[in-house]
Image (spheres, rainbow, N blue to C red):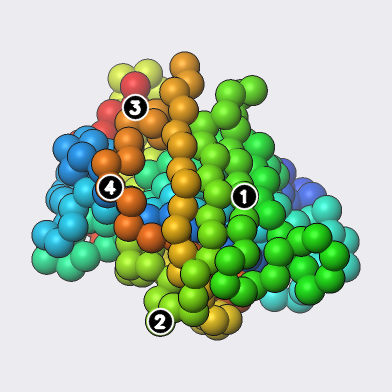
Amino acid sequence: MTGVRGFFHPRTASGASSLIPAPPWRYSGDLLTVEYRTDPSRVRELLPEPLELADEDPGAVALIWADWQSCSASGDELLDPVRAQYKEAFAVVRCKYRGQTYSRCVYIWVDKDFAIARGLHQGYPKKLGSIHQTRPHPYGPAPRIEAGARFGATLAAADRRLAQVVVTLREPSGTNGFVNGHPMAHHRWLPSIEKGKGLALDELIESGAADFEGGQPWVGEAELELFEAPTEELARLEVREPIAAYYRQVGVVWDGGRLLESGTSGATAG
């Protein structure tokens, strides 16, 4: 008998066509992080049971742009850059589960199909988008990583601009912010193929970095704008009060998570 191989679709005799390889997945990236406060009720409406609002600063939001190079354990993708390079923008809030504070990605857009597939596995709600951000460089007109440097970033989806920001760096920082600083609490959902049968997969999971290294964070100020769109709701997390903006270069390894509970979110397939 013959079988098929591959960590993800399409599975074939060799497994070479699989959209994503098995973890661990390794990342190198430049992150622009903008933190602000919104109405806590807008955060609460995005938290399915059994998740609750965080006790401290429940309306805090981080909107993050990331320019990534990623690869599997072999690193082969780095020498075939179309398989390694992608960009994303995502909104993170904080929540509480059984007394512990978690971070949770509530919206995320990426520009490559393999990044969407990884998100399905990890519980990130990824959609296709158009993401751009200023890259630093030690020569020419690009900004250096220094006081006064200015970085721009934009996010669009389905031909509509959703967000834009200009970040001005002020000084080195001891932190890269606090909203995205906890393990992630995500749901993995998949509707049943049979109508009316609810969810075939309903898991609350925890995950985070298996390994992490990072350069010196810089802190500054942000001029952030969010825009309405017919099929996106990022603008509901309206900016009530700016907190700070950050720039940092990081290296991350992701190698799985753990199941917190299953079948109890109350989510439906519709």
Residue at the disc numbered 1: 152
Compare marks 1 and 2 and give the one earlier in the sequence: 1
Query: Is the residue under label 2 in contact with that under label 4 (CB below 8 Å)?
Result: no
Question: Viewer-proximal residue, 6 or 163?
Answer: 163
Q: Secondary structure at mark 4?
A: strand
Image-based side of 139 in relation to 100, left or right: right
Residue at mark 3 to residue at mark 1: CA–CA distance: 38 Å
Residue at mark 1 to residue at mark 4: CA–CA distance: 20 Å
Q: Secondary structure at mark 3?
A: loop
Residue at the disc numbered 2: 174
x 51%, y 37%: residue: 163
Compare marks 3 and 2 and give the one earlier in the sequence: 2
On the image, the x and y values in percent for residue 29 come to 64, 66
Residue at mark 3 to residue at mark 4: CA–CA distance: 35 Å
Which numbered tag is attached to residue 269? 3
Residue furthest out toward the front: 148
Residue type pointed to by label 3:
Ala
- Whether residue 175 is visible: yes
Q: Residues within 10 Å of mark 3 (few under 14, many from 20)?
A: some
x 47%, y 46%: residue: 223
Query: Is the residue under label 4 in contact with that under label 1 (CB below 8 Å)?
Result: no
Query: Is the residue under label 1 in contact with that under label 3 (CB below 8 Å)?
Result: no
Compare marks 4 and 2 and give the one earlier in the sequence: 2
